[in-house]
Amino acid sequence: MNPFDYRAGYGSQRLPLFARNVVATSHPLAAQAGLRMLAAGGNAVDAAVATAAVMTIVEPCSNGLGSDAFCILWDGQALHGLNASGRAPQAWTPEYFHRKYGRDTIAPPARGWDSVTVPGAVASWLALSERFGKLPFGDLLAPAIEVAERGYAVPVVVGQKWAAAAQVEALVAQPGFTEAFLPQGRAPRVGELFKLPGAARALRAIAATRGAAFYGGEIAEALARQARVQGGALTAQDFAAYRPEWVTPIAQAYRGQVLHEIPPNGQGLAALLAAGIVAHFDVASLPVDSVASQHLQIEAMKLAFADVYRYVAEPGSMEVSAEQLLAGDYLAARARLIDPKRAQDFGAGNPVKGGTIYLTAADETGMMVSFIQSNYMGFGSGVVLPDWGLSLQNRGHAFSLDARSPNVVAPGKRPFHTIIPAFLSDADGAPRMSFGVMGANMQPQGHLQTLVRMVDYGQDPQAACDAPRWRYNAGLEINVEAGMDPATVQGLAALGHRMEVIQDSYQDFGAGQFIWRLGDPAVEGYVAASDPRRDGQAVAGSVATAVRGAARPALGRAGAGDGRCDRLLRQGIVAKLLYRHGLDAVTVLFFRMLFALPLFLAMAWWASRGRPPLTAHDRRMVLLLGVTGYYLASFLDFLGLQYISASLERLILYLNPTLVLAFGVLLFGRRVTRPQAVAIGVSYLGVLLVFGHEVGFQGPDVVLGALLVFASAVSYAVYLVYSGELVQRLGSMRLVGLASTVACALCIAQFFVLRSPAVALAVPEPALWLSLLNATVCTVAPVLMVMMAIERIGPTLAAQTGMVGPMSTLLMGIVILGEPFTAWIAAGTALVLVGIWLLARAR
């Protein structure tokens, strides 16, 4: 359906964009990142997450890694909502703030730690990627890491907002703010190159741990530590307990269409209320920019805000529900309060009781994503971790300290939120448009104004976006853009509106992005628009599925676990699944060894019955093998994965057979036969073919990561070499039981040193079942079988036969994780199989 008159234009000179795959946002680099995901075989969700990640770098004044987020998406079958707004620290109560700031304080402060709730943006990315995405999560963050490391030229609007923020004393006074965002003692100038290497480091850690570093790992620990030092209340437990919430969008019918918004605790309800009130008037019979049309919309918006500010909060704290406020009789009664001849200052009704960025993406399969994230006020709280390039939102400032308010602060509660994505469907539920307008309380006002222009007046999305806007503030105060017809301004003033014309509209009237579906997305596609009030644009891609598997390498995809003793099921596959539940490496190792410990103890006890006690030499060797083979090898491997891709990690790990042979040469004078060398070379060539093309994406920390993983391989090689003699005397079961018990104790102790116990308590039940699988099928059984192999065929051949790992990893990655299978993988797998065959002949 193509309902628009494309001749209706305003002064921006922009034209609507037509395409089958579209990304629209307020910075070109971010939009390009989204297209890159589509070209790599991803979908609209992949594009949206990649775009959102880049936006945290290129518009740090409006959002960042410490932001909150909301999303509405159409997956091709149904509409889904995601609320990733942050919750208050457990210590927050009205008394907490009154004690610190005085009894007359009415709200938490606007800046500093006492304005920060748990940020939800990173969790929203992971939730969207896990449920609807196609590409590996690490791939989605790769463009943002590139931009953070290489830098970007500061655009006009961002430069203006940055310069304004640099004059806010409460921001500049925050520790670390100047270091991170005013490195030369000033805001970067328009066109000046700006880099955020700390943010690149944070993004790498987030990619490597699938977000776990942010909520239960080193970033969370750093945030909690700084909060504690600087007098804040946020703790590691607050971060570990955080989860975003999937919600059902609320809706209001409008002229045969249906407007959808996220339910409270946000102000999306205001847009629905205003639309439901305007629907009682024949707006289309009035000229599009007339006084009468604008007046009706302004008055409807006032009525909507009166109710929203009175009633909306966390749903459990509201005395009336969204459904009650949207009841037809109530909306009709509110509409009757509007006087076409006079502006009014409305109060809340009495229903029957019972700093922001926006982006949207759509692909030719029909998936459409409406996504918004924000740090609230410019640069949020001003709280910064310079080493991580990370600033935090100040959403806690939106709480009330009035015990009578539904928005009164409480532990774990979410505050009233201004950021709202929107979605439009037809009366039958078919998708029409994903859209949003950023800008505090301008957001529902922008939703209403652009909706009326498109639905009532047939303006195309770009024209509706370009048109001059009004903004209701409070009472009778209305701001309008300088582009509005002076006669309309004068006419509104004559009705009693207190009008103020704003010359610089960049800061006051929001900015929108729009994607309207014209029909079959694979044929007619979409028409898109991007707001001229920001630096961005809508960009198009020709196809969404042309280059399967060609995405840039995932930075730190979930690692390969032990990576060597996984004959039955690759630990790396289970580790990836565990990372998808928000666990980090330390926590994965903790649960793996916690569940495996009883089995290893039983194994050691059973095999030691009737056997002589260990000699002092044997005890030292058991301790050495437990540390090197089962603890240190795994820990160093996971640690290195924070800095390099899983492909490079696997490549280094499969150097293990050559390291064992090298130890054999150095320690025992053995020689490598030519057939063995050829077999190893062929196998490793296969590994290089499978993963070599991913190694091209290198970061500044890759040397450290490579060294850590190489140290892991060396550690495991030491274990293999020295276990051969000991297993002959102790037996495979006794040695495995004793050495693994040592490793279990070390991993468990490590967790309690590096992590809060609250992290373990917050692990979801599915992750516990996966951890049990990891401990039994992927750890205890394979470890025992490897030692039995060493007992029978020796360490060198045992290490060489472990080279079948790449094939099992690839097969399970394709079947379980949906990883792509390309010609590179096919050729590499063939070479690995040939190498294994040659090794068998070399025996």
Image (cartoon, rainbow, N blue to C red):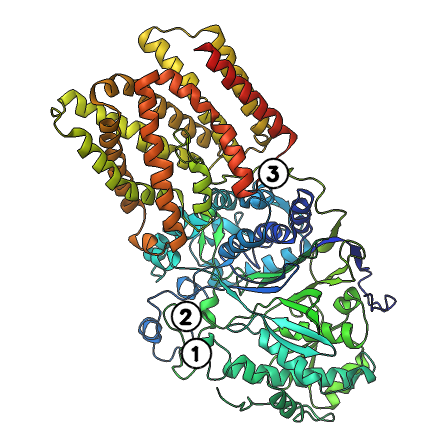
Q: Is residue 213 above or below residue 806?
A: below
At x 34% / y 22%, what residue is drawn?
A: 789
Real-space Cα separation, disc 2 to disc 1, in angstroms: 9 Å
Q: Residues within 10 Å of mark 2 (few under 14, many from 20)?
A: many
3D distance between C-alphas at marks 1 and 3: 47 Å
Q: Position of residue 772 (x, y in %)?
A: 35, 45
Q: State if disc 1 and disc 2 touch (CB < 8 Å).
A: yes
Q: Secondary structure at mark 2?
A: loop
Q: Foreground residue, 224 or 593?
A: 593
| Residue position for label 3 | 820
Position above or below: 589 against 449: above
In the image, which is nearer the foreground, mark 1 or mark 3?
3
- Identify the residue shown where x is 38% and y is 28%: 712
Nearer the observer, 831 or 113: 831
Q: Earlier in the sequence, mark 2 or mark 1?
A: 1
Q: Nearer the viewer, residue 730 or 694?
A: 730
Q: How many marks?
A: 3
Is disc 3 placed on a helix, strand or loop?
loop
| Position of residue 533 in the picture relative to residue 783 (left or right) | right
Please, is residue 374 above or below residue 715 in the view? below
Q: Is residue 387 visible?
A: no
Which residue matches tag 2?
413
Across and down, in percent, residue 642 comes to 45, 39
* Residue linked to disc 1: 317
Amino acid found under the numbered disc labelled 3:
Pro
Asked if labels 3 and 1 touch by Cβ distance under 8 angstroms, the answer is no
The answer to whether residue 345 is above or below residue 470 is below
Question: Which amino acid, by three-letter code, is at mark 2?
Answer: Lys
Q: Quadrant of residue 444?
A: bottom right
